[in-house]
Each structure stands twice: as C-alpha cells, then as structure tokens.
Amino acid sequence: MASWEDGVRRVVPYTPGEQPKDLHIVKLNTNENPYPPSPGVLAALSGVTEDSLRRYPDPAAAVLTKTLADAYHVSPDQVFVGVGSDDVLAMSFLTFFNSGKPILFPDITYSFYEVWADLFRIPYQKQKLNADFEIVRNDYLKENGGIIFPNPNAPTGVLMEKGAVRDILRANPGSVVIVDEAYIDFAPEGSSALSLLPEFENLLVVQTFSKSRSMAGMRIGFAIGSEKLIHYLNDCKYSFNSYTMNQAALAAGKAAAEDSGWYRETVRKVIATRERSKKELSALGFSFANSQTNFLFVRHEKAKARDLFQALRRAGIIVRYFDSPRIDDYLRITIGTDEQMDILFDFLKSNL
Ligand code: PMP
C-alpha cells in the first residue's frame, strides 16, 4: 500500500551553529563579526515608516541594488540581492546547475552545497583538497555541469590565488562558475574574483553582509555577475516571491553599503586579532592552515577536538565542532574581540 511518505523529499539537513540567548557566552562558533554594524544602520532602521511596513517591498530591490552597483563599480543590471547569501546561493543552484552533468565542489567545503545539490537533485562530484587544505585547480578542468567553491574556503580559511581562479574560468566556458566570497573582505586586497568579471560572462561572485559588515541578523547577501546571469537569476527569484527582501533589511542594507569605511575598519581590527591569535594558538601547540578569513580551523596533537569543544562549552566559550569524518579532529574558532580571545587563550593555557 502506498504511503503519503513515499512522496516526501528527504534530505540530510544542514546543521546550523548554536545561537545561545545568553549574551555572556563567548560566542566564537558562527563566524559573526564581534563589532557592531555602521551607526547608519540603526538610524536607517529607526527611520522605517509605518507606510513602508504596510506596503509590500520593491521586489526588484532597486534602491539597494543601485547602491551596491555604485559601491562595486558595476551596472545595477549586474547585481542580484537576496535574503542572506544562502538564499542567493540556493537560487543560483536552482537556476544554473541544470545540465544533468555533475557539478564540482571541494571536499572539505561549506556543507550547504551538498544539501542544496541533494535537495534540487543536482548530481555532484566532490574534489578532495590537498594535504595543505588547498583547492586543487587541476581537479576543476574536467567536464562538469557547474562549479562552486568558497574563496577563501570554509571551514578551512584557505585562499586560492586569483590566477588559479582565472585558470578554472578559462577552462570552463561551458558552465557557470560560482565563487562564494563570504569571507573575501578578510583576505588581502585584490583577492576578489570581481575584477575577472569583464573577462567571463559565466562567472557569478556571491558576497554577504553577514561577516565583514556585521549584519548576520539582517540576512542580506548579493551576487554580482554578467547582465545575462543576473537576468536568469531574477526570473527564478520572481517565481518564489518569499525570497524578496523585507523593507527593514532593504533600508539597513542601503545604509551599510553607503558606509564602506566603517566595515573596513572593523575588518582591520579582526585581521589584527586573527594574526595575534595565530601566534597564541601556535604557542599552545595548535596547528592550522593559513586562514585569510575571520576564523581559524585548528587541531591539537594531544587534545581531542570533541573533548576540547565540550570543556570550552562548560566554561561558557562556544566554538564550532563538526561531527563528521575527516574534520572531526578540528575546531573552527571565530575571531572575536581581543578580550574574547584572551578569555579563550587563558582557558586553554590552564586546561591543555
Ligand atoms: N557561504 C559560506 C562559505 C559561509 O560560510 C556562509 C555562512 N555560514 C554563507 C555562505 C552564508 O552566509 P549568509 O547566508 O549569512 O550570507
């Protein structure tokens, strides 16, 4: 006898990081920025009017789109905004990865890629990182139905040189290549694939307001690509009206996009703390790949990651532990303020 459950789409869901209510917890588990967003953001939110809430938002998000286009020196027709870059990425999978050929993405990488591929029934082949946790350029030169990788990669933090990104694009004129730059603002200037856009119609660069702009709670992400790619993305998006950004996020996003100086300053502080943290953690016996992000992916010879994660948790410090093969020896530690990192280092000094 058939069951209604036969028709259910079943996936192994993404496991989100914990979001505890207690603000005293030293929260180093979901790569949020420890500094506040631009003061213009709160001002813009308090300026949201009753009328703007009563009405539906502009589905084209024309004002935010134009502000971002100006900030990144592209045409508004090259910008697509969404409810966090997760939304932009999911919509991009749905729009661009339909050839039936396997898409390629790294193993280890952002675990949502596999979830979306399963959800949308997109075949995929995972490409192993090398021993230094680098994405191997040559693994992305074979025939495929699309390519996606984060740059810098997550949760490893390792950056791929722009020359290698260009090689991958040159070898793949027949598929869409998505570079997920959630953490690019923490990498050396000039690392972004945005500068390759004039050369490649099939390149989509995805970024977010969640990390460098300190606005994870607002859910704003965006893609920049050729006018053709953005046109196709919009057609798909308009078929899912629920993906339209809300009025408050549109206002907040505009204010943040207009104040680049603010986020660059918080990024500078996070990078300084990251480099200091590398030294502290090395001295404590941790090893890690060379992160160019706002987190470190670390391993300790003597302490088991799971035990350390639990001991830290009991001490009110939350880091990220991935209970899955190949990465369960590691902890991912978000870079917090210097004070937060000192609490972590003090704990480690007396407990390792
Ligand atoms: N890409 C990568 C590589 C990430 O780590 C994250 C954050 N978890 C995202 C995309 C999504 O970020 P958001 O939806 O907050 O923009």
Image: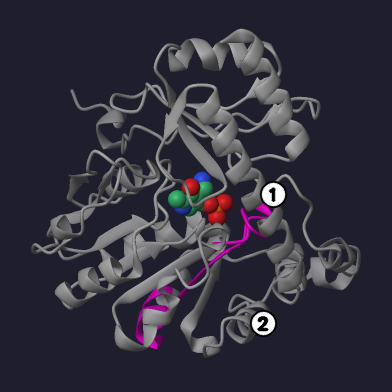
Q: Give the range drawn in magenta.
A: 208-233
As drawn, which residue projects farthest toward the left? 143
Q: Disc 1 designates what residue?
A: 217
Q: Residue at x 45, y 12 (%)?
A: 303
Mark 1 and mark 2 in contact (Cβ < 8 Å)? no
Q: In which quarter of the image is the C terminus?
A: top right
Q: Which mark is residue 58?
A: none
* For residue 332, above or below residue 291: above
Tell me the residue that label 2 is attached to.
67
- Quarter of the image with the N terminus in it: top left
Residue 219 on the magenta segment = yes
In the rendered structure, does residue 269 fall within the stretch colored magenta? Answer: no
* Distance from Cα at disc 2 to Cα at disc 1: 20 Å
Q: What residue type is labelled 2?
A: Thr
The amino acid marked with disc number 1 is Gly
Helix, strand or loop under label 2: helix
